[in-house]
């Protein structure tokens, strides 16, 4: 099994696309600000899942999954900021995907940590 077989990786790829579509509607002055931060954090999620899966140990893989989870929480906060700035009306679908990704990452982390013993 490779990272490409992981549902969390597949969903995170779709989430990257969603974030890029969302930020395309942000004001132009945010191109190097909030838009860029959201995009980089989104790309970080599947990238860290893939990179971690290629590491030598399960412990290292788990570390990269925690980094992916951190990026997810970063996005959640940045979407709240975008809402406050009136760049988006609601977080809506994105929040549901974030919750799903968080749950999937937590499940994978728990599975890997429990199999390590």
Image (cartoon, grey):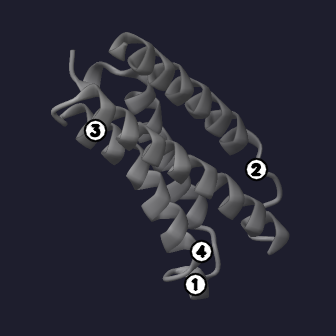
Task: Look at mark 3 in the image and give the residue it sits on.
Answer: 52
Task: Look at mark 1 in the image and give the residue it sits on.
Answer: 28
Residue 19 in the image: above or below residue 45: below
Label 3 and label 1: CA atoms lie apart by: 34 Å
Residue 50 in the image: above or below residue 113: below
Tell me which corner region of the image, top left, top right, bottom left or bottom right, holds residue 12. top left
Q: How many marks?
A: 4
The N terminus - image quarter: top left
Q: Is residue 30 left or right of residue 13?
A: right
Q: Nearer the viewer, residue 93 or 41?
A: 41
Residue at position x 60%, y 55% from top? Answer: 75
Tell me which corner region of the image, top left, top right, bottom left or bottom right, holds residue 48. top left
Dot placed on the residue nearer the N-terminal end, 4 or 2: 4
Residue at position x 49%, y 83% from top? Answer: 32
Dot placed on the residue nearer the N-terminal end, 3 or 1: 1
Which labelled disc corresponds to residue 91?
2
Dot placed on the residue nearer the N-terminal end, 4 or 3: 4
Q: Are marks 4 and 2 in contact (CB under 8 Å)?
A: no
Dot placed on the residue nearer the N-terminal end, 2 or 1: 1
Badge 1 local density, few (<14 within 10 Å), some, or many (20+)? few
Q: Nearer the viewer, residue 14 or 100?
A: 100
Q: Are marks 4 and 3 in contact (CB under 8 Å)?
A: no
Which labelled disc corresponds to residue 34?
4
Residue 53 lies, in percent from the top left, at 25, 32
């Amino acid at each position: 099994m490779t990272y490409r077989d992981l549902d969390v990786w597949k969903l995170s790829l779709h989430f990257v696309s969603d974030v890029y579509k969302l930020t395309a509607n942000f004001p132009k002055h945010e191109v190097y600000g909030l838009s860029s931060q959201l995009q980089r954090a989104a790309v970080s999620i599947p990238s860290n899942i893939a990179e971690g899966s290629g590491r030598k140990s399960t412990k290292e893989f788990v570390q990269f999954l925690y980094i992916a989870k951190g990026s997810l929480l970063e996005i959640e906060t940045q979407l709240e900021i975008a809402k406050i700035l009136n760049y988006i009306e609601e977080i809506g679908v994105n929040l549901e995907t974030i919750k799903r990704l968080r749950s999937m990452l937590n499940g994978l982390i728990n599975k890997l940590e429990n199999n390590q013993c």
